[in-house]
Amino acid sequence: MTDKEALGPAEMIINSLLAYSDHMVHNRPGVVVPDQRTTTGVRWDPVTYKEGENGVRTVYRLSKTGRKQHRTEIGTMNGEGRKVMNGRTEVGEYRPSGLFPEVAVWFYKQVAEVWKLDNEFAARWASFAFRQEHRDLKVVLAAFLLVQSRKGDPEISDGEVLFHDEDYRDVGEAMMLLQEKGNDLNPKLLLRIWEVLMLPEVAAINRELGFGKSAKRPFLGRWAKAVEKWLRYREENPKMLEGLVKAGFRTTVMTLARRIGYKPSSEWFFETLRWKQKQAQDGRREMAIGKAVKAAESWEELDETAICETIEKTKPNWKRVVGLLPKKIGVTRAIMAAAIEAGSLSDKDIIMVAPTLEELGLLKVQEVKERLSGALARADDMRAANVARNVRSKELQEEMEKGADKAAQKAVEEVIRDVRIYFFVDRSASMEGALQAVKPLIGKFLQSFPLDRVHVAAFNTVGKEITIKHNSTKGVEAAFRGLKASGGTHYGGGVLTLAKYKPKEDEDSLFIFVGDEEQQRTFEGEIEQSGLRPMAFGFLKTVAEDGAAGWRRRHYPESTAVRDTAARLGVPCFMIEPNTFEDPYAIPRTVRALVAATPVGEVAKGHVRPRVTLVDQILNTKLLEKPAWA
């Protein structure tokens, strides 16, 4: 049974994971540098390098301002080594594209902590997460449950089996095997589970928890067994395997088969994957040895007209079109128009290619313009906010930003129904520099909330209400325009400024603070005086690196006024990662997580439709079950 007392700490851990926005996988090379401001203690930055003489490679950090990309030289690498050196100083470690181990290990540790608090709750959490959009978290949860020790063992007394223990490895298998559009794990994610479990740090965590028996080899639990079932089912359903090949997963499926030594039941498996078989040295292979395989589909010999005709006839998805296009032709106006006409581009695809549509002049075609406008109106994530930086037209940029604003509002509309948000921004002298950096990021966050349920104040020695006139990124940026850092720090003053906006009887309130916490005393008195009765704090802590504030941070103990105030009030304080604001994809997820993790007050519990907290959502989630065929 679930341990109720363990749910508070477990909820804190889960919310930290949901609010964390760095990626567990990077699809391009980068450099990892120490950074104590981050949760993992390191930071990943994109890089490229240039080959020089004597095997020396010059490494450049990549950054972007609008459409312009900048390259900044940061050091050199020698030979096959990964250390990036600036003279005798090590700048960081070069990493090829792929898994970011530090983030994967941090995720895994958090999952392990929740499991140690309550085994059943961890399994229900994984079942709940399966139908959420956080792919990195789903991978780590599946990996953990496949190896954890609750696996249905019999309980025996006097030689008689009394009952079988819970089998939570079944939940991990179900996450790998269930098919639900938009939720299931594709072949790359199944392989990523293996990559996570093979990390030495993860293997060490598993040994410490008593998972597996080997003191040397990483423990994989039921991963191989689940992959075998997954492969067998697709072999027995030819259309499914053919669909994976068409979707670009051919080599990933082959890698999965190699990892477990899969033995197919017919030669058709190899033929579909275009996988030519050679005899092993021990002669163990019996199927399709030396047999020729069908060549992969190619458009290399086709001209532009023939490619357009093929697209109109076969209606491939956009990913396949891009994969088959000959480099000598590329994406032309005619090919793009044919793909749109054939329905090859999903709403997400057409938003992503908006800069190309603009460059090809297709946005002057009314049908194409309407197709993009419709996709922006239906958008359910904020990718348009990223794409908007790469278009030239101000009109198109504003339309895409508007689409991102609506997507953010849509994403949090239901969860925020019974919550009132109070947002406090520190504008004291110690925030000089930091304030200018966070203002545009705050805009991306605040525009997610309905204007009638969000109240904003900036404060130094005294508080000042910030009025947002329009529910959009631009509206928030305009409200903060001209705000300068000066004066002392009085969090309580900011709170009292918004005391006139009391939550309704059926509403809970969430406080979100942005600041450096440079205040020595707590301010629970002002909060109690305000009557705003917060149920939880969200806190983005800025860290000064220079100036007087930076000097104080390095020479004096860290101030914890916000966190101490939460503790004295008996409410949770959820930390928000600074880079959450920089990642448009993470903002709606972070907002939903913060609100869902806010406890429901006694008044709101009596409401006709009480808000369901994150813990309640997880507790009410039925444990995933494997499909019938598994």
Image (spheres, rainbow, N blue to C red):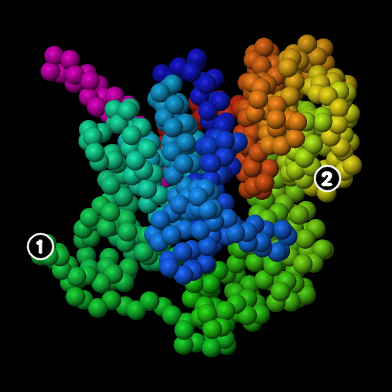
Quadrant location of the N terminus in the rendered image: top left
What residue is pinned by disc 1? 282
Upstream in sequence: badge 2 or badge 1: 1
Which of the two residues, 621 or 564, is positioned nearer the viewer here?
564
Which of the two residues, 562 or 178, is positioned nearer the viewer here?
562
Which of the two residues, 142 or 259, is positioned nearer the viewer here?
259
In the rendering, at what x and y percent does residue 213 appear?
22, 33
Q: Which mark is residue 477?
A: 2
Q: Residue furthest front?
A: 88
Give, as a three-letter code, the residue at label 1: Asp
Give, as a three-letter code, the residue at label 2: Glu
Q: Residues within 10 Å of mark 1 (few under 14, many from 20)?
A: few
> From which residue to which does the magenta span run?
150-179
Left-right relation of 481 to 197 = right
Q: Residues within 10 Å of mark 2 (few under 14, many from 20)?
A: many
Residue displayed at 77% across by 33% down: 431
Is residue 274 visible from the viewing direction of this image? yes
Residue displayed at 66% across by 22% down: 556
**Quadrant of the image occupied by residue 601:** top right
Q: Does residue 62 sit above or below 92 in this rendering?
A: below
Quadrant location of the C terminus in the rendered image: top left
Q: Residue furthest left?
A: 282
Is residue 598 visible from the viewing direction of this image? no
Left-right relation of 159 to 177 = left
Magenta stretch contains residue 383: no
